[in-house]
Amino acid sequence: MRSFLAALVLVAVATPASAQWLERKWPGIPRTADGKPNLKAPAPRGPDGKPDLSGVWDGENVVARPNPSDLQPWVVDLAHKYQQEYFRTRPYYQCRPSGPEAERYAGWKRVLQTPTTIAIISDDLTSRVIHTDGRTLENDPPPSYQGYSVGRWEGDTLIVDSAGFNDKTWVTRYGVSHTEALHVTERYRRTDFGHMQVEVTFSDPGAFTKSWGFNANMALKADTEMLEAICEYSSDNWTVTDGTPVSVPADVLARYVGVYSGIYGGNKRTIDVSLSGAQLMVKIVGAADIEGGLGTAGLDPDVAQRLVPRSQTLFEAFGLGFEFIVNDKGVVTDLVEIHISGPYKFPRVK
């Protein structure tokens, strides 16, 4: 069994070996003595003297987990519901535009800047337009996935105000909803030729008890091009192999209690298994917020989640499979985490 859920597949366009345009030098950019892009050179400026944000950028992974106390109760309730569904209805997993979702600030984007307009094109082929021609934000723009954005410069920082979002998107992958009153403020600052910082603040009195936000860092990817990353199979295709839990004796469950540790996504990951009454619980520590959705702890990362038994050794939680490995002496030696990207073995350390 590879996974309990047939997870979302994101397919990047395959590039033939002869496609040399992926390694084509950009003309007219600063370079070091060895010919490489000088990412620490000063930020370029447009004809108006303002920083030019144009380029192909790659955003770092974003973890935007708001404090539940900053959210209206109905938003928290929905987030918990979505977590129990393994965030299946996340717009990104349903091949729909993600709109203002924080985690989608990560990944590849092309920025095109003119004196009156800035366009941001993502590798999933969604796009947005920021008007910088001096107009003010519309009072009641028609609701849309990307909203309506206007920008202005304060020194070398671009301030973007956005409104007019529909309520079909989330503001984080953790299932945090919003209303059509959502207002997003972004502050873009290109610190040098190769780096850009973004500060984002969400305001929505119908969904949040106070404004909250996150920071994102982006790195310029010079001398290359951006490939497509297209959603082809939505989460509507996710299936569960068996929706009926089985009964596992308490003495068997007790043998699985322990700490298992290994490497996931290049980072150390620890899985703490405990027993609460007659229920086996699991808590993931470290490398749990890698983009992909499965394996995330939701709004309450410090709360252990229930392990649902599917056999005497196989369990499910977070949309992942967990299989306990028992040797011929009846000793539990490892815990295998079953993910769409493959099984990950975590030896028992306690």
Image: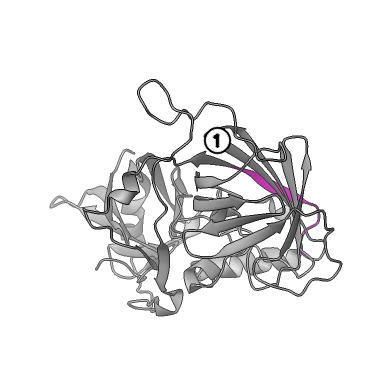
Location of the N terminus by quadrant is: bottom left
The x, y position of residue 309, in whole percent, is 36, 67
Q: Residue at x 56, y 60 (%)?
A: 173
* Residue 90 appears in the figure: no
Closest to the observer, 22 or 122: 22
Q: Which residue is mark 1?
A: 195
Specify whether 63 is left or right of 17: right
Position of 198 relative to 344 (above/below): above
- Quadrant housing residue 266: top left
Residue found at x 69% / y 50%: 67
Extreme residue toward the right, this view: 139
- Residue at point 67%, 67% (across, down): 77
Q: Quadrant of the C terminus?
A: top left
Mark 1 is on which residue type? Answer: His
The spot of residue 298 in percent (x, y) is 56, 57
Magenta residues, as a range? 207-216
Dividing the picture into quarters, in which one does residue 147 lie?
A: bottom right
